[in-house]
Amino acid sequence: MERTAASQNRRFTSFTVRQLSPALGAEILGVDLRDPIDEALKQKFLYAWHQHLVILLRNQVLDEDTQVRFAETFGPPAKITSGRTFSVKHPSVMLISNIREDGKPIGALPDGEMNFHTDQCHQEIPAKASMLYAIEIPSRGGNTLFSNAYTAYETLPEDIKHRIAGLRALNAYDKDSTQRTANYDNAGSSYWHPVVRTHPATGRKALYVNRLMTREIEGLPREESDAILQELFDYQEQPKFVYEHVWRPGDILMWDNRCTLHARTDFSADERRLLRRVTILGEKPV
């Protein structure tokens, strides 16, 4: 797609923000990410992101370089730790895809539904943010659900807040499953993090447990731990806390892993789905 010299030299000093749902999320209008991002625009992006938790830009034409440059607006990109290589130029780029070549998926997380989770919560330093760019999208399904972990925590009954105050939970990831499993013997890595974490930029508290990877609460009998976690999972996944994103090619969407959870709806294995992901380095939850 060609652009005029005027558009190539354009600098965006403002943009329009359109709320995506009452729960969370905002669409940014009036920005072409192929153009440079100056400091003023960077601060506007950060403000919108911290306010809305999830930001979306549609109709973007992005190569790997441009996507990584946009990710760097929010912090250093994180290198992939799975051992696979998806890009010869950028170790932070991952493909999310069900497309197969020689019988093997070209990307990670290829098929089906995926439980609510936060990215890399099984590591000591989880991802601060994740960014997905849509290249090929099935005609139906493969939507991404986002839950507002701030609101989920803030609206919890006071007795539950008291029960979980100061507790830690074990997060473990079985890379071969997108659904919660009965055990986690095959987990590649695991780490204990606070059940409730404080966002370093906003100071707000958010629930930091999730159905896919949170396994147990430290110091509690297993039966009691399981009951509390199930109650928290059910509570934070209520529709009133959730925005469902229906993807279109050219969408780029970024979410804050410190105060959101996300999940994926099922889609046909007969249709192609291809997205490019970059995650951004975070900090140890407190």
Image (cartoon, rainbow, N blue to C red):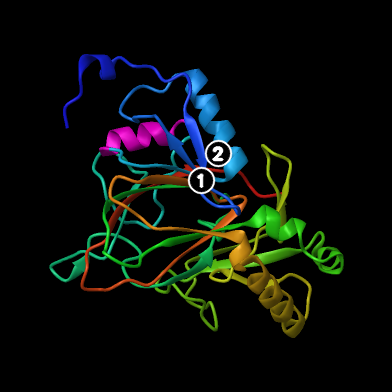
**Disc 2 marks which amino acid?**
Trp
Q: Residue lying farthest left?
A: 102
Where residue 18 appears, as percent x and y from the top left, is 50, 40
Alpha carbons under labels 1 and 2: distance apart: 10 Å
Find numbered disc 1 in the image and state the secondary structure of the residue it sits on. strand
Tell me if residue 282 comes above or below residue 138 in the rendering. Answer: above
Tell me if residue 173 comes above or below residue 11 in the rendering. Answer: below
Highlighted magenta segment, given as a residue range:
61-74
Q: Can you tell which mark lies on residue 49? A: 2
User: Which residue position is annotated with label 1?
Assistant: 129
On screen, residue 135 versus residue 37, left or right, reads left
223 or 61: nearer the eye?
Answer: 61
Where residue 271 appears, as percent x and y from the top left, is 22, 68
Q: Is residue 176 magenta?
A: no
| Residue found 30% across the figure and 28% down from its top | 34
Residue 58 in sight in this render: yes
